[in-house]
Image (cartoon, rainbow, N blue to C red):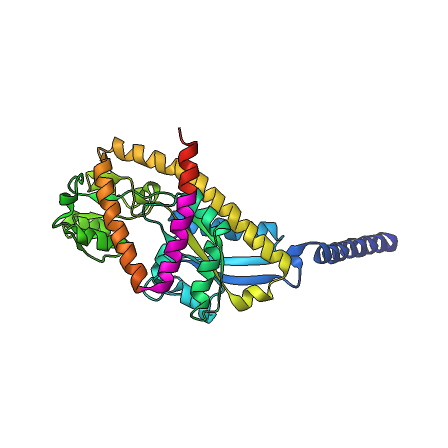
Amino acid sequence: MKRTLGTTFRGILCIVAAMFLMVVIMSQTSPAYAKDKIVWKATSAYGAGLSYHQHAEYFAQRVKEMSGGRLIIQMNTGGSIVPVFSEQEAVHRGSIDLSCSSSMYIRGKFPAAVQLGTSMYAFTQQEFMAWLEYGGGYELWQAMYDNKDWNVKVLPAFCIYGTESLGWYRKPIRKPEDFKGMKYRTVGEWGEVVQSLGGSVISIPGGELYSALEKGVLDGTDMSHPSFDKGLGLYEICNYNVYPGVHQTSGPMETLVNKDKWNALPDDLKQIVIAALRETTFRSMTKTIIEDAEAVEFFRSKGVEIIRLSPEMLDVLKNEVNKVLDERAEKYPFYGVVLKSKRDFHEKWKKYEDLQSW
């Protein structure tokens, strides 16, 4: 009996020792147990069901996987930890570490932010990314914040959307006169173009668009690219969806990190963050195009008339767009610097693009 108990006791000791040894080994070899694990508090500006938040979550997941758990980015939904559209300032002040948002939301404080977050009558996704990476775009983006001493580091975009539709309408849009008297919801410089054509611009949150169109408070609205718009259900109340979206041909979504947090990050983790962002952007470029094409066919199946504007109409809009851009460039010097950089880059890009077109 004693031998049995002794044998059992020794067996238990062996098991305990083996378990202890395994924990020690894992703590030394598995990054998930590393004492230097870093956790960042982050947020997007979007709800859980929207594609932009899903891209932000994908980026955070890839950082965790690529770093072996050494860097954890806790991605929150828009409005859950800071008010929506205050994400950039929250990063600057250090109340959050990282944000995935859009520079267009801070155009009131930084007029040039519109030029960084979108393009009118110019950049495609590929061209926009080329300008950011190799045409000085990211340097100008950083300079915009540095000029006002904001404590933020501009990282590569976490997403870049493709060309939007020109919007949703209760009546067809085919000629400039069709905008006259229209009650229209939009933001930024495109609103000034609509006003120049005789429309009136109304500011309404995205969540209220369906009701406003249904009740006739609005006659039309732009929003985003087709697969994003599909989730809003606007096809149920608007009979007309107009293309191409020359008011927003493409746009990178903004990734900001607090400078102090970034500077304290080990170099290898910095490279992982950048690599994860570039992977997520590539994913957004390819995945979204397919989803947008499918969304347009879905709209057709629901009886929506898809309208493509004539070359004559597009020329009229282009002239109005350039007038507005030139006026703002004259009013805001740094806006003009960014606009000139984009125009110069586009001129070179377009020449070669035309040479290779068939």
Left or right position of 133 against 166: right
The answer to whether 236 is drawn above or below residue 8 in the figure is: above
Residue at 19% across, 43% down: 169
Residue extending furthest right?
3
Give the number of callouts.
0
The x, y position of residue 109, in whole percent, is 35, 67
The answer to whether 178 is drawn above or below residue 117 in the figure is: above
Give the overall secondary structure of the magenta segment. helix
Answer whether residue 187 is visible to the viewer in this image.
no
The x, y position of residue 57, in whole percent, is 47, 51
The answer to whether 306 is drawn above or below residue 208 in the figure is: above
Answer whether residue 229 is visible to the viewer in this image.
yes
Magenta stretch encompasses residue 10:
no
Q: Quadrant of residue 304?
A: top left
Residue at 35% across, 43% down: 163
**Residue extent of the magenta highlight:** 332-348
Q: In which quarter of the image is residue 204?
A: bottom left
Left or right position of 32 against 78: right
Residue at 79% across, 57% down: 17
Quadrant of the image containing the C terminus: top left
